[in-house]
Amino acid sequence: MVERVRSMLVRFMPGLRSLLSRGPAGWMVFIGVLIVFSVMLMTLLGPWIAPYDPFTPSVGPLLSPPSSEFPFGTTRLGQDMLSRVLTGGSVMLQVAFLSALFCFAVGVPIGLFASYVGGKIDKSFSIVMDSIYAFPGLVLAIAIAAMLGRGVISMALAIAVVYIPSYFRIVRSQVLTIKELPYIAAAKATGARWYTILFVHILPNVIPSIVVVVTVNFADAILTAAGLTFVGLGVEVDVPDWGWDLTRGRQDLPSGAWWVITFPGLMIILLALGFTLIGEGLNELTSPKLRK
Amino acid sequence: MVLLEVEHLTIDYKTRKGIVRAVNDVSFSMEKGETLGLVGESGSGKSTLGLSLLRLIPFPGVITSGNIRLEEKDILSLRDKEMRSVRGSKVALVFQNPMTSLNPVKKIGEHFVEFLRTHKPHLSKKEALEHSKKILDELGIPDERINDYPHQFSGGMRQRIMIGLAITLNPSLVIADEPTTALDVIVQDKILDLLRDLSRTHNMGLILITHDLSIVLERCNKIFVMYAGHQVEYGKSKELYRNPKHPYTQGLLRSIPNIELADQRLSAIPGSPPDMLNVPTGCPFWPRCPDAMKICKIKVPPITSLGDGHVVKCFLYGGKEP
């Protein structure tokens, strides 16, 4: 069965051959990418394919269960749930990508630099990073988001602060091993400057592990973004967002309206699952220990 | 013309457990184009000595005294920036393990380009690649393989690439630190011959660091024997082979299989090299020395010249009387 699907896929996209021939990890990456891209495509095209405007109230009966006209039901204001699900991913995706970008831009250079220099600089950065790491992520993100105010950027920053230590740690652990390898000594013996050694010789060897962290943290960022929105620190009300739908749907859940939180919730889980699959799959593919 | 002069060089590793004197009052000199075999057991300080010529001694190591002059330039007083331009262009290093001395994510060509452009920033990538193809050619590696990654080469080929990198800028001195330890015997022979031939054609000085006296006897002009950081005996290869003076050198030579003396048993030097944190007082070799005298346990022997550049650090040849 799996074999038949594989040969069919490979026939259409020959580039997949090497990925899918690597066993379960290859499939995880493939399915993860498939999920993430479908969700991204859906969100991108959402405004055009949505049957109703996601904001217009009273397009149907208030809080009606799924029916043929409104497959995902309606909200308490009578907005179409399907339209809201189709368009509601944009904030989360923006936050996830932005926060990954911030994390990368801060965590990776600090990790590279501190661990290469070593000594007191490395120690003080490690202490700061470890103390952030020890803090419960969501609590810290809430505190920072509350300080920064609402908006996509401040959400992304709040999440970035929480995850920078993960980047720092993975980069640090890699650099500490790589910098002792003979090819680094060889580079030094050829008169290379410190930044050449750092960015030309060490960084490319660290990138595979960073890619894994990025994808795993995408999933975390999605969930944290949902959490932030849930406690009311998300974006303004006039943007459709799965997180908001969860927050407001909660009030209607006791009256039996399961559909208002089930569909946005499923979307969040699906997106997080997609990113996790990519991350875990890549992790298995890139770490030589697990390779057969 | 004198290429390299090392005078009374002493290098310490200041560890938590105490000071390890890895190189202890070592002096030698090399002419341009000369080959020197640096022989010693593991931990005798030969690698540290090699690295010190590039000022690349790893962290707790410090040069505590002595002088290193390369082409009349004092290496130890150079600023860091000047030192960096010496590395690779004047003095090049070939490492022990070719398997890990090349960056696994960089193509062979990139190694050359990176290296060439570090020292000649005006060089374009294309020119650098052209130049590296020429070098690979000289080493017998087809130039279409310039876009291959290190793992696609065999150990011997990788070591040839390392040697190619070392000679890229025509340095006046190449230091090869046990270049063949990781290779099999036949490849070892080829690599060593290649190094010797290159040093001849390019008129480069070559320091061959090894624990195997036999492989340098036939290939090097001079031999420098080290034991526990001390220079033990230093002289021309032929002289040293025919007429070894120091008991340690004699012991090393007796432990090499000799086809003319096939009926004799090979003899080994009894004992093992000292713990470098607790080197015996006096001559470090006395606990293993068949000719040890009372004075050997008290005083470090002076360096005695026997003429024609042959020097030995042993009381058997003088220095007993104050």
Image: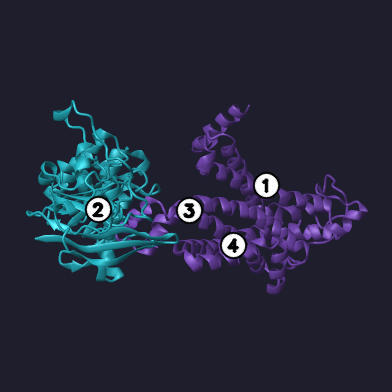
Chain colours: A purple, B cyan
Can you say which quadrant of the picture contains the N terminus of chain B? bottom left
Q: In the rendered structure, which disc, 1 or 4, sits on the residue that comes first in sequence?
A: 4
Quadrant of residue B185 within the rendered picture = top left
Name the residue carrying label 4.
Answer: A164
- Residue B167 drawn at (x, y percent): 21, 52
- Residue A275 drawn at (x, y percent): 63, 49
| Residue A273 marker | 1
Q: Secondary structure at mark 1?
A: helix
- Residue A114 drawn at (x, y percent): 49, 64
Name the residue carrying label 2.
Answer: B294
Nearer the camera: disc 4 or disc 2: 2
| Residue A206 marker | 3
| Residue B149 marker | none
- The residue under the point 66% across, 69% down is A154
- Residue B110 drawn at (x, y percent): 32, 51
Q: Secondary structure at mark 2?
A: loop
- The residue under the point 62% across, 54% down is A218
Quadrant of residue A104 within the rendered picture = bottom right
Classed neighbour count for the residue bearing mark 1: other residues with Cα under 10 Å, few (<14), some (14–19), many (≥20): some
Q: What type is the residue that disc 1 sits on?
A: Leu
For the residues tagged 1 and 3, is the chain the same? yes
